[in-house]
Image (cartoon, helix red, strand yellow):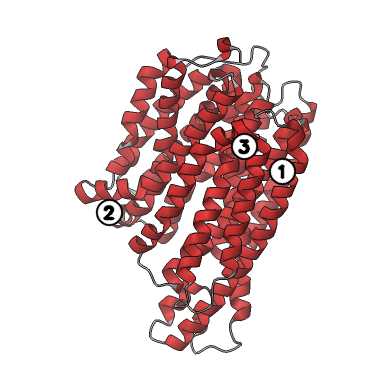
């Protein structure tokens, strides 16, 4: 090993700063779920405004990731990170002290744009700071581990804040993290930019936003209200702009998105594996979360406690994945993780219709296996992608990785959720004493709470939907495990 390429104390301290950003961004997402009822009552937010308060952040985050990743390659990744940290901290203040729902929605939109500068810049800087492949894998695993830790502790942090302070404290929590980036970032983080990068093509920026924003909006609407004309038209419009965007990128000498990245087989294959895995896990998580609260009739707190083992398993696996990959190779670690996830989802196919017949144990055990399994490719997949991409394109590669994650969640919730809903409705008898129960399992619990026979039918039908979604996920994970070995084994540089 060439010791001149090894990272030292400065790089590992810089990683702590980047990891703190990941921790904050993930906490900021999960903490809002608890704050929403409080801020909605205080601001008088309507049901539609509540949805926009939740969703506008992810809309703008997903929409600007590609642009910001490429912008970092052009103007400097540390510079963009510092700008993003200042913008995130500044936008947090009006969010915390918002006096109307409209003001909070606008502030959340600004936070999404700022967040889009932070995520790809962080991963791209890790690519520059850790030139040794093994150290880079470890660093990315730790970064992802902190991100997942934030998701796990977010509800706990939110509960403590809301117990002692007002809802705005959930937004102010991010300010000290961003001040840390501003103060220490210039000293501990290196600057890097593509020396041959051209100017930013504003038409490509507009086309990328016109592609991503309608698609994400349409997928979220489909997950919320089913496949209505509005969601279909939005997705179709985004797809049409996407074709125009890709055609323009092929013609430009300095494209916003370098399509040559997709010609790199390890990069493209890993990106596809991560996207499909995210789709399956997002859909499964949606179904199992609903199962715990509607079929098992657990309170939100009880359901959250039963999900803790899943989060712990994922954090542990993320942390261990790079070390395991150094011994057996990244391709084998990714394939093994996908196989373990397939076993976990197979357990979900065996969940009985009756809630009292051991379904809770199967669901929790399956979630632990599926989450620990998917954490293995997550822990090393980004390292494979960042290593495969040229250093000057690290920002673009990181933005594609993060964008695929956003799309994976949106597609998974919409597609797998729609499958579960279709099976649920098909399993119900043609006539019900309360027809509102046919809409969804949540509607059934609300409308038929005093009709146990209807509730039993609805819970059995929903469980069959869970079984079906899990069966599809099992097949996809098993196929991905085989494909990972077939495609990535010969390109494995982590062994």
Q: Quadrant of the N terminus?
A: top right
Give left or right: position of 279 versus 99: right
Q: Earlier in the sequence, mark 2 or mark 3?
A: 2
* Residue appearing at x 76%, y 24% in the figure: 252
235 is higher (above) or lower (below) than 490: below
Which image quarter is the C terminus in?
top right
Q: Mark 3–mark 1 contact, CB under 8 Å?
A: no
- Cα–Cα span, label 1 and label 2: 50 Å
- Name the residue beneath numbered marker 1: 484
Label 2 sits on a secondary structure element that is: helix
| Residue 70 in sight | no
Q: CA distance from mark 3 to mark 1?
A: 11 Å
**Residue 218 image offset from top left, x and y in percent:** 61, 54
- Number of marks in picture: 3
Which of the two residues, 371 or 269, is positioned nearer the viewer here? 371
Residue designated by label 2: 42
Q: Nearer the viewer, residue 310 or 57?
A: 310
Q: Residues within 10 Å of mark 2 (few under 14, many from 20)?
A: few
* Secondary structure of residue under mark 1: helix
The residue shown at (73%, 29%) is: 261
Label 3 environment density (alpha carbons within 10 Å; few <14, some 14–19, many ≥20)? many
Q: Residue at x 45, y 24 (%)?
A: 15
The residue at which mark 3 appears reads as 381
Circle 1 packing at 10 Å, graded few (<14), some (14-19), many (20+), is many
Q: Where, by quadrant of the figure, is residue 200 drawn?
A: top right
């Amino acid at each position: 090993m060439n010791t001149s390429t090894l990272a030292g104390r400065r790089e590992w301290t810089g990683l702590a700063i980047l990891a703190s950003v990941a921790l904050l961004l993930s906490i900021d997402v999960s903490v809002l779920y608890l704050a929403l009822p409080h801020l909605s009552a205080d601001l008088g937010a309507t049901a539609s405004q509540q949805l926009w308060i939740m969703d506008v952040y992810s809309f703008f985050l997903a929409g600007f990731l590609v642009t910001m990743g490429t912008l970092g390659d052009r103007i400097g990744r540390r510079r963009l990170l510092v700008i993003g940290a200042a913008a995130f901290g500044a936008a947090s203040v009006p969010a915390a002290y918002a006096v109307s729902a409209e003001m909070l929605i606008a502030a959340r939109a600004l936070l999404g744009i700022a967040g889009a500068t932070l995520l790809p810049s962080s991963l791209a800087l890790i690519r520059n700071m850790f030139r040794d492949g093994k150290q880079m894998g470890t660093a990315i695993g730790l970064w992802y581990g902190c991100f997942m830790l934030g998701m796990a502790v977010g509800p706990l942090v939110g509960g403590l804040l809301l117990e002692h302070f007002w809802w705005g404290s959930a937004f102010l929590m991010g300010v000290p993290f961003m001040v840390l980036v501003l103060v220490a970032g210039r000293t501990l983080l290196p600057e890097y930019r593509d020396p041959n990068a051209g100017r930013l093509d504003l038409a490509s920026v507009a086309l990328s936003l016109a592609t991503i924003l309608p698609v994400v909006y349409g997928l979220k609407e489909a997950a919320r209200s089913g496949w209505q004309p509005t969601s279909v038209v939005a997705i179709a419009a985004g797809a049409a702009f996407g074709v125009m965007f890709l055609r323009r990128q092929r013609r430009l000498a300095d494209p916003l998105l370098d399509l040559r990245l997709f010609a790199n087989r390890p990069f493209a294959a890993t990106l596809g594996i991560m996207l499909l895995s995210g789709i399956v896990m997002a859909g499964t998580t949606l179904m199992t979360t609903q199962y715990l609260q509607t079929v098992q009739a657990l309170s939100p707190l009880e359901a959250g406690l039963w999900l803790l083992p899943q989060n712990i398993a994922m954090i542990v696996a993320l942390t261990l994945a790079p070390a395991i990959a150094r011994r057996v190779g990244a391709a084998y670690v990714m394939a093994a993780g996908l196989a373990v996830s397939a076993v976990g989802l197979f357990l979900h196919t065996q969940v009985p219709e009756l809630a009292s017949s051991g379904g809770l144990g199967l669901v929790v055990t399956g979630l632990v296996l599926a989450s620990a399994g998917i954490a293995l490719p997550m822990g090393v997949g980004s390292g494979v992608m960042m290593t495969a991409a040229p250093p000057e394109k690290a920002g673009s590669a990181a933005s594609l990785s993060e964008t695929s994650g956003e799309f994976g969640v949106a597609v998974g919730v919409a597609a797998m959720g729609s499958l579960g809903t279709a099976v649920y409705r098909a399993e119900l008898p043609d006539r019900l004493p309360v027809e509102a129960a046919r809409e969804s399992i949540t509607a059934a619990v609300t409308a038929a709470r005093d009709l146990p026979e209807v509730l039993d039918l609805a819970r059995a039908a929903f469980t069959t939907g869970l079984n079906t979604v899990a069966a599809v996920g099992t097949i996809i994970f098993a196929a991905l495990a085989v494909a990972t070995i077939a495609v990535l084994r010969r390109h494995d540089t982590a062994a």
